[in-house]
Image: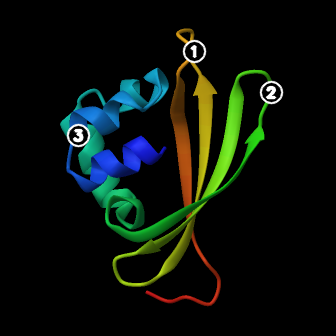
Amino acid sequence: MTRQVEALGRDDAPAAYALAAPSIQALFPTPDVFIGMVRTNYGAIYRHRSFVFGAAREDGADGLSQDVAIQDSYGIDWTASYSLQRQADGEWRITGCRLTKEPGTSL
């Protein structure tokens, strides 16, 4: 996930897209479409001030979940709950992300 966050910070759509699981790539068939979706729906991740990774949790034999505390460019705190799946080549790819604004913060 660090590599994807760094790639997004550089506007490197191909690198960020390469870290998404095939199921995500099927929904967003090109790097440009993918990064457009991230810009629109995951602005706190796309442009952040800080991020801190929580502990990873196993989800079955080939799955992981991980929460990431994020502060966006406006100083608003969010939690990004990622799911990852080990691919046939052994690499971990992101299969989903749920972004939730922390209680007590306002837009």
Within-10-Å neighbours for mark 3: few <14, some 14–19, many 20+: many
Which residue is labeled 1 in the image? 90
> Badge 2: how crowded within 10 Å, few (<14), some, or many (20+)?
few
**Tag in front: 1 or 3:** 1
Mark nearer the N terminus (3 vs 2): 3
Residue 37, position as x, y percentages in the image = 31, 49
The residue sitting at 60% across, 34% down in the picture is 84
State the mark number for residue 13: 3
Quadrant of the image occupied by residue 50: bottom left
- On screen, residue 64 above or below 29: below
Report, in whole angstroms, how far the alpha carbon at label 3 lies from the one at label 2: 30 Å
Q: Amino acid at mark 1?
A: Gly
Q: Position of residue 87 (x, y in %)?
A: 56, 16
Q: Nearer the viewer's eye, disc 2 or disc 1? A: 1
Q: Amino acid at mark 3?
A: Ala
Q: Position of residue 60 (x, y in %)?
A: 80, 27
